[in-house]
Image (spheres, rainbow, N blue to C red):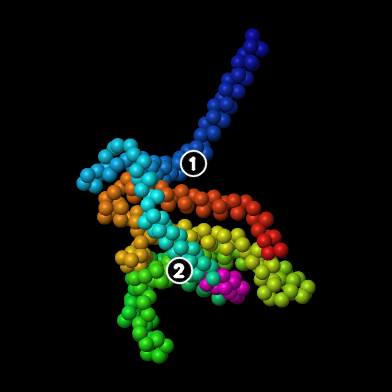
Amino acid sequence: MEEQAALAQERELAAGAAGKRKRRDWGPLWTLSPVFFWMICFVAAPLAIIVLVSFFTRGLYGGIDYLFTLENYVRMFNPLYFKILGSSLSVSFFTTLFCLLLGYPFAYFVARAPQKIRSILLMLIIIPFWSNSLVRTYAWIVLLRTEGIINTVLIQLGLITEPLKLLYNETGVLIGMVYTLFPFMVLPLYTSIEKLNPSLLEAASDLGAVAWKRFVRITLPLTMPGIVAGSILVFIPTLGYFFIPDLMGGSKTMLISNLIKNQFLTARDWPFGSALSILLILLTLVLIGFYMRLARSQSDMEVFGA
C-alpha cells in the first residue's frame, strides 16, 4: 500500500511538472502575439486584399466588379507601361549612383573625423529627418525655380545668361530624390568605414601601395557591405516615392509610383492599380533577395578587389 501511494504521489508530481512546463511554453507565444497581430492586421491582410483586387474587374463608375480576370496583368505588357517602368528604374539607378558618389567621401570624412566633430556631422545628417520631407521638397522648389536663389546668384555672377531649367523635368526629380535619400546611403557607409582597421592600410603603405591602390584593394572591398546596404536602402524607396516626381517633375515625368497613385485616386481603376502594386512589390522582393544573398557571401566580397 505504501509503495502504491508513493507511485501515485510521484505521478502527481510528474503531471504537475509537465503542466508547469506547458504553462511556461506559452510565455514566448504571449510575448510575440502583439507582433503577430500587427503583422497579420497591417501587413498580411492588406497585401492579401491587394492581391485579390488585382484579379477583379473595374466597375463602370470606378468601383470593383467581383469578376475574375487576368486582364490587369496582361495590360502591363503595354509598351507605354514598360517605358514608365524603365524611366522609374533609370531614375532609381542614377539616384543611387549620385548618392553613392557624394555619400562615400562624406561618410569617409565623418568616420575619420575627431570624435567631437564626428558627433556634430552625424547630427547634421539626422536633423533633416525631424522635419517633414514634403516641407523640405517645397523648400527646394523655392531654391530651384526660374526666379529662385540659385539661378539669381548664377546670373549675377555672370556664369549663365539665362535661367537653368532645374524644375519640372528629370533633373529636378533627381535633385529631390538625392537630397531626400542621401542619409540612407551615408549611414550604412559610415558604419562600414568606421569598422575598417587602420592597421591594414598602414601595412599596405609600408609594403609600397600608393593611395589609390590601398583604396581599390583594401578600403573598397572591406566597405562593400555598406555600399550594397546603402544602395538597396536608396534604390527601393526611390521606386515608391511619388510626391517628389509630382512636385518637382511636373506632368512630363511619370514614374511607376505616380502611375499607381493615379490609378487609385484619379482613374479609380483599383484592380489595375493593385496589379501594378504587386509588380512593384515583386521587384522589391527580388532586390531584397539579392541583398540577402550578397550579405550571406560577405566573406567572398573581400576578394572582389584582389
Which quadrant would residue 44 be assigned to in this image? Answer: top left
Tell me if residue 49 can be seen: no
Mark 1 Cα-neighbour bin, 10 Å: few <14, some 14–19, many ≥20: few
* Left or right of 197, for residue 88: left
Tell me if residue 294 can be seen: yes
Residue highlighted by disc 2: 178
Amino acid type, mark 1? Thr
Q: Is residue 122 above or below residue 63?
A: below
| Residue beneath the point at 56% across and 25% down | 16
User: Which quarter of the image is occupied by the N terminus?
Assistant: top right
| Residue beneath the point at 62% across and 13% down | 5
Q: Where is residue 256 drawn, in percent x and y?
A: 38, 57
Mark 2 Cα-neighbour bin, 10 Å: few <14, some 14–19, many ≥20: many
Name the foreground residue: 279 vs 210.
279
Numbered label tally: 2
* First-in-chain label (1 vs 2): 1
Q: Secondary structure at mark 1?
A: helix
User: What kind of secondary structure does the magenta stretch mostly adopt?
Assistant: helix
Residue 22 falls within the magenta-colored stretch:
no
Rendered image: mark on residue 31: 1
Name the foreground residue: 213 vs 182.
213
Q: Is residue 151 above or below residue 106?
A: below
Give the magenta part as a residue range. 102-114
| Residue beneath the point at 78% across and 73% down | 207
Q: Where is residue 198 drawn, in percent x and y?
A: 69, 70
